[in-house]
Image (tube, rainbow, N blue to C red):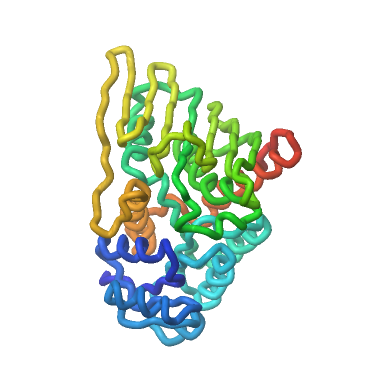
Amino acid sequence: MGDLSFAMIGAGFWAQYQLAAWQQVPGARCVAVCDQDQAKAARLAERYQVPRSYSDAATMIKQESLDFVDIVTSIPGHVPMIELAISHQLPSICQKPLDASREACERVVRKAQKAKVPLLVHENWRWQAPLRRVKEVLESGAIGQPFRARIDMISGFDVYANQPNLRTDDRFIIADMGCHLLDLARCYFGDIETVYCRTQRVHPDIRGEDVATILLGMISGQSVMVNMAYAETPLEKECFPETLVFIEGERGSIETTPGCWVHVTTAEGTHRSRVLPQRSVWADPEYAVAQASMVPCIRNLLAALRHEGEAETHGKDNLKTMQAVFAAYDSAASGQPIRMVT
């Protein structure tokens, strides 16, 4: 099989990094960029030597010979672009979250399944180098059966500088960061049984929540505390965008610490290793840990599209993460734990 041809839909902040990551993965070639702002699409295409640019996705799909599309629009554009691709029997990769609406997420996943058109989700957080090492250690059995965990993404980084729209979102940190962290919990421990959540808003000039604490009860028995905050207080950890994990097992523990260190403690002592991400010239140093994870994520999704492997984060799987996101908001509103429907 030769290279697959694809188009990128969306030319905003994240698209430039996504396109750069694609160019590090053999087996696919971007032939067009589309954005409602034609000038923005043309600039991104020129920067990365993509042959053509468009302002209308429907026109692009009709005129190009594509094997799939990569959707990197703002959230309101996700479902319409997925549905457009489905109508042309064209596989799609979509950024998280699929949509801000529970009903729309469920509808588009059902639609893709019914049409038998692949819908994959670019959920790169689980592919960060130190977090991937944690998964490997868990699967090795080194710490025995895990029973409790904590996942923290707490930073004083000014996330609004590059993404000012986050200030006006009615739902902020769970919808934005919670997608990643709840997916990570599922990556480590499987499906979620119960969700209990509390939220706060510390910034006075934003609409959504900038602090959230979520307690997950996993079907496999673990209790997982997920903490996230962009409150920018002086005491918040300045290791953005590193996620810090601590997992306790019957025979030991795994912990990640700032600087991409992974500590594995058993009866034999503590083994410390530094698991740095692959460095790329295109990565923003402030986002490097997260942006480097785009490459292995893309490699996994592309293998699935080429029928050379299975995608870890396809639409049906990601729907479980999104259902947990919506359950967290329901819990925060009601003050009660939410039992997930399995």
Quadrant of res 8: bottom left
Q: Residue drawn 38% across and 18% down? A: 252
- Left or right side of 156 for 65: left
Q: Nearer the viewer, residue 239 or 192?
A: 239
Q: Residue drawn 58% across and 71% down? A: 80
Q: Horizontal and vertical percent for residue 209?
A: 62, 45
- Left or right side of 111 for 248: left
Number of numbered markers? 0
Q: Nearer the viewer, residue 5 or 33?
A: 33
Q: Quadrant of the C terminus?
A: top right
Q: Nearer the viewer, residue 67 or 247?
A: 247
- Does 173 appear above or below 131? below
Q: Quadrant of the N terminus?
A: bottom left
Q: Residue drawn 51% across and 73% down? A: 85
Q: Horizontal and vertical percent for residue 297?
A: 36, 53
Quadrant of res 178: top right
- Does 191 appear above or below 85? above
Q: Residue drawn 59% across and 33% down? A: 216
Instruction: Name, please, the residue furthest toward the right.
Output: 334
On the question of residue 320 being in view, the answer is no
- Does 108 appear above or below 189? below
Q: Horizontal and vertical percent for residue 316?
A: 54, 54
Q: Nearer the viewer, residue 156 or 326?
A: 156
Q: Horizontal and vertical percent for residue 100?
A: 62, 57
- Does 331 appear above or below 117? above
Instruction: Name, please, the residue furthest toward the top.
Output: 267
